[in-house]
Image (tube, rainbow, N blue to C red):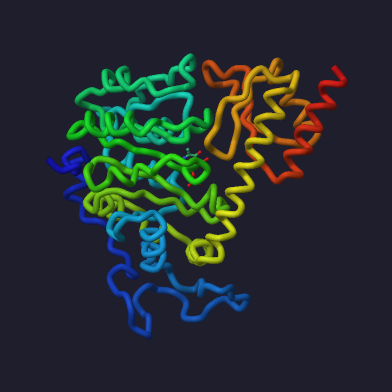
Amino acid sequence: MSVLDLARPELRALQPYSSARMEAAGGQVWLNANELPWPQAQASEAALNRYPEPQPAALIDGLAQLYGVARDQVFVGRGSDEAIDLLTRGFCAAGASNVIISPPTFGMYAVAARIQGAAVREVPLRAERGYALDVDALLAAVSRQTRLVHVCTPNNPTGNCLPSEQLERLAEALRGRAVLVVDEAYAEFSDAASATRLLPRFDHVVVLRTLSKAHGLAGARIGVALAAPELIALLRRIMPPYPLPSASISAALAVLRPEALRLTSERLQLIRQQRELLRVALAGHPCVLEVLPSEANFLAVRFVDATAIYARLSAAGIIVRSLQKYPGLHDSLRVSVGTPEENALLLATLNQVQRAA
Ligand SMILES: Cc1ncc(COP(=O)(O)O)c(C=O)c1O
């Protein structure tokens, strides 16, 4: 059985749009895409009068090297958000399929499913076990209509990682039944091994990575799906004609250069140090009930009065994310690890709140 047996059958037969840039690479005189022949007067580094390569070869090469996979295992799109959307559209039929998520987790898995008309089955993380994935309950929720199972490691918003034996068990159990989507948006902040190690054995595993977090490129919208070549080929068949703006491609190529990667790893070190300083300081703070252990660049923090703290921080110009809509996290806020100065300001503001109380 191929993973494509789980995809929407009508897409397997779909004649994809063939863009001008796909049909003809190379050449010097480009008269095939109805572009204007001159760049804009205020030309930037990239020649913006030309359509970009749909899946830029140099970027695919760089990402394959970065993540230790082959080129035909890489899809690059507008953020991992786009990969989530394409996976949902590629595998889920409206009114027929379902996806499984384990809340509290990243919201786009459910939103993408609902936009596509797929049902969302929720198998909550076990709060009493440190927000561990309930693998037995998850597998029990898989039906003949299940197409995608989403896991997130480190998980947003709880920050914990999925142990590798659980991931292996899930991959084994879902073979031939559903695609296992492993979202590693925050992997660089953790020591856990990447699920890319599963790719040679499982053609139904997809690993999502992004340049938005550790690589500091959220504004460029560069996200990656890593999977078996046939699954990547499916995503490329259903992607928009030119998903990536030229300026974003240039920015992504720049962060993959060795000097940029060195700076990224220095910054990762600093973020991890700051995460620990912040965790310790918050855990000892009288406003705080608990800080969840985190392997990402944020901390989920339970407060005595999260609503009041959110308001006081906002009034001081410090914006954190409320987690109060999540069951079990009604007293929690999520705080991204900032610069040392920003983190110190956060702590100083909490101290002021405490003194005023
Ligand atoms: C777990 C997770 N996955 C994916 C994304 C989307 O990232 P991107 O910027 O690559 O679309 C986010 C963004 O916050 C996230 O937290």
Residue 54, visible in the rendered structure: no
Q: Nearer the viewer, residue 218 or 162?
A: 162
> Where in the figure is residue 149, as x and y percent of width and height?
32, 31
Quarter of the figure that contains the N terminus: top left
> Where in the figure is residue 142, as x and y percent of width and height?
26, 23
Q: Nearer the viewer, residue 49 or 280?
A: 280
Q: Residue furthest bottom?
A: 28
Vertical placement of 181 versus 292: above or below? below
Q: Nearer the viewer, residue 137 or 86?
A: 137
Q: In the visual, does 335 lie left or right of 356?
A: left
Q: In the visual, does 48 lie left or right of 110?
A: right
Label total for image = 0
> Where in the figure is residue 129, as x and y percent of width and height?
46, 17
Quarter of the figure that contains the C terminus: top right
Residue depicted at 38% across the width and 46% down the height: 83
Residue depicted at 43% across the width and 35% down the height: 153
Residue depicted at 68% across the width and 36% down the height: 277
| Residue 195 found in image quarter | top left
Vertical placement of 243 versus 318: above or below? below
| Residue 319 found in image quarter | top right
> Where in the figure is residue 78, as x and y percent of width and height?
45, 52
Q: Residue furthest left?
A: 1
Q: Nearer the viewer, residue 37 or 281?
A: 281
Residue depicted at 53% across the width and 50% down the height: 212
